[in-house]
Amino acid sequence: MSPEASELKTVVPVQGLSAPRGVWSVAIASRPGRLVFVSGLLSKNERGEIVGIGDVGAQTEQVLKNLQTALAGIGGTLADVVRVDVYCRDITKFDEIHAVRRRYFPSEPPASTMVEVSRLTDERCLIEITAIAVVP
């Protein structure tokens, strides 16, 4: 199996490990480019209001839209993301979160870690995502 490649990243074919159950790649190799580190994003709209209170799917959608906006500011897209760290309040919502992620990362998904946390900086938030991208 040959790795899928984009301009700046390659999904590394890993043998001997189980396939990811969700939307992520086990390993990503990046080529030279500008590293972009995106701080933790919450489900806030452009006015700073929390979107989707009580709905992790709606909040995940807003967070990923915010990530798109942040990357666009430097000329990047979600295809440039090589890693995300996901902090969620309820790990049992894994499938619901990944259903949304699948739409935003339809191919070559980034490497990823998801952990359950007891609180985020706003008690109404159910998810926070940080990202690393390699942008041309």
Image (cartoon, helix red, strand yellow):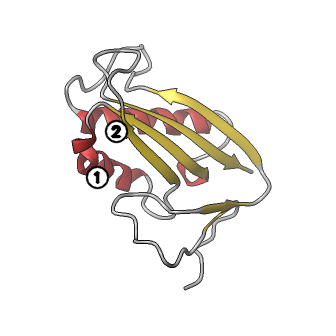
Which residue corresponds to the image point at 49% horizontal and 58% vertical from the top-left?
Answer: 109
Secondary structure under the numbered disc 2 in the rendered image: helix
Q: Earlier in the sequence, mark 2 or mark 1?
A: 2
What residue sits right under mark 2 in the picture? Answer: 61
Camera-nearest residue between 77 and 86: 86
Residue at 73% over, 43% down: 35
Separation of marks 2 and 1 at Cα, in angstroms: 10 Å
Q: Is residue 129 above or below residue 107?
A: above
Relative to residue 25, is residue 93 depicted above or below? above
Residue appearing at x 61%, y 61% in the figure: 28
Left/right placement of residue 64 relative to residue 89 reads: right
Give the residue at mark 1.
99
* Amino acid type at mark 2: Glu
Place residue 12 in its image quadrant: bottom right
**Given the image, on which type of amino acid does mark 1 rest?**
Ala
Quadrant into which the N terminus falls: bottom right
Along the horizontal axis of the image, is 84 left or right of 36? left
Q: Nearer the viewer, mark 2 or mark 1?
A: 1
Q: Secondary structure at mark 1?
A: helix
Q: Residue at x 60, y 38 (%)?
A: 72
